[in-house]
Amino acid sequence: MSVQQYVREWTEQPVRNVLAGMVGTFALIPEVIAFSYVAGVAPEVGLFASFVISIAIAITGGRPGMISGAAGSVALVAADLVHGYGLQYLLLATLLAGGMQVLFGLLRLQSMMRFVSREVATGFVNALAILIFSAQIPQMLHVTWHTYALIALGLAIVYLLPRLSTAVPSPLICILVLTGISLAVPMPIHVVADLGALPTGLPHLTWPQVPLTWGTFQIVLPYAFAMAMVGLLESLMTATVVDELTDTHSSKRMECTGLGISNIFVGLFGGMAGCGMIGQTVGNLRYGGRGRLSTFTAGAFLLLLLVAMHRFVAQVPVAALVAIMIMVSISTFSWSSLREMVAHPKLSSTVMLVTVVVVVLTHDLAAGVGCGVLLNGLFFSFQVMKLVQVRAEDTPDGTTRTYHVRGQLFFASTSVLTDAVDFQDPAKNVVIDLADAQLWDISAADTLEKTATRLEGRGKTVTILHADARAAKLLATLGHPNLLA
C-alpha cells in the first residue's frame, strides 16, 4: 500500500466518516455488553476491548471502513476459559491469540480464504443477519407497549428521514429523538443502563496475573488458537463482504497482522479478544463510513461516551438500539439469494443453506463456514470425479489394449479408472495413455501402480504413456518409475 493511498483513506469525506463512526459506536454498545455476558466478563472488559481494537486497527488494519470490536463468536470460545479459570487467563489467551494472528499474516496464510466459495460467503452473511435480528428479540419480550411504539418510531426515522436529507445519518437522529422523548415523557422502558454497569474510568496497562508455567500454557494455548482462528475467519469474511459492497480491494494480509497487533494491545489493556463485526460494519458503510476515520471515530467516541457522557449513554432507550439493529439485519441479509436458490444449482443452494443452519443453531461462525467449505469441497470433488472418462481401444490383432484416460485423477476419482480396466481381457500388452489426464495426489499414483501390478500379475506388459512431470514424480515416490514409457 502506498503512502498516498493510506493518507487518502484517512482524509476522504471526514465529516461523513465521523458521523457514520458515531452511529457505529451506538450499535457497538448493546452488542458488546451482551457478548461480555456471554464470555462471563464484566461489560467494561468488552467495551474497553472494542475501544482499543477500533483505535489500533484503524491505524494498522487493511480494510478501511470496517468496524471491529469484542464479537460474539470470540466470546463463545472464551466463555469456557473464563468460567473455568478466570479473567486473567483470558487476558493471556488474548495476548497469545494476537501473536498467532500476526504470525498468520506474516506467513501470508490469508490466501486460505480462497477456499471460501460464494455460496459459503452468502450463507455467512445471511446467518449473521438472522443472528443480529434474533439478538434483538429478548429486548422485545415482556415489555410494555411504549417499547413497541418507540421501536416503530425509530424504524420510521431510520427509513424515512434519508428521503428528506442524508446530511446526518438517520440512526444518529433516531437515538437523539428517542432519548429526548424518553427523558421528556417518563415511561416504563429499558435503557442502556439496564443492560449492565458501564465503566466510568479510563483503561490502563496491565499484565495477566497468572503463573507463566508450562501448565498454564497447556490450559491457555488451545483457547488462544481457537480465538485467533475464529477472529481471523470473521474478520476476513467481513472484509470480503465490504470489498464487494464498496467495489474496492483490501489487504487481507495487513488485516490479519493489524488484528493481531490490536488484540495484543487489547490484552495489555485488560480486554477480551475481538474481530470484525459485520452488523456494525454494514451500518457504518450504509451511512458513508468508507475510510479509516470512521473506524477510529467508533472507538474514540465510544470512550468519550463512556467517560464524559456516561449519564447520557445510560439513558438511551434500548428501543432506539433495537430499531437500528433491525435495520442493520435487514440490510445485511442477501435477499437476492432467496431468488437465486431457485435458479442456481441445487448443490450450491444446499451449501448456502447448510452454512446458515449451522451458524444459527450453534451461534458459531467458524463451525458454519467450516461445514460450508467442507461440503463445498465434497460437492466439487464429486462433480470433477464425474468428468473422468476412460475409453478402451484394441489393436486389430488383439494383442494390445490401450486405455485413453481423460480428466483429473485424485483420491475421489481413481476408482473410475480401476472399474474401467478389464483384468480378464486376453490382450498381452496394456497401455494406459495419460495424454488428456492429470494425476494430482499420491492416492491417484498408488491406484495407477496397483492397477499395473495386478495386470502384470496376470502376465501382461504394462506401459504408461504421456505422463506429465507431476505423475512421474508421484510414481517415482512410490518406487515405480519404470512404469513410464
Image: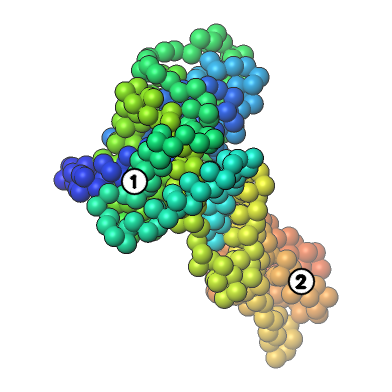
Residue 184 image offset from top left, x and y in percent:
39, 36
User: Residue under circle 1?
Assistant: 173
In the rendered image, is residue 232 in sight? no
The residue that appears at 54% across and 56% down in the rendered structure is 126
**In this view, 374 is above or below 228:** below
Residue 28 image offset from top left, x and y in percent:
43, 37
**In this view, 138 is above or below 402:** above
Q: Amino acid at mark 2?
A: Asp
Give the residue furthest to the left: 4
Q: Report crowding for label 2: few under 14, some 14 to 19, many 20 or more residues within 10 A (C-alpha).
A: few
Mark sitting on residue 419: 2
Q: Report crowding for label 1: few under 14, some 14 to 19, many 20 or more residues within 10 A (C-alpha).
A: some
Residue 376 image offset from top left, x and y in percent:
60, 59
Give the residue furthest to the front: 185
Q: CA distance from mark 1 to mark 2?
A: 69 Å
Residue sitting nearer the eye, 172 or 377: 172
**In this view, 336 is above or below 37:** below
**In this view, 394 is above or below 415:** below
The residue that appears at 66% across and 43% down in the rendered structure is 362
Residue 335 image offset from top left, x and y in percent:
51, 64
SS assignment at label 2 = helix
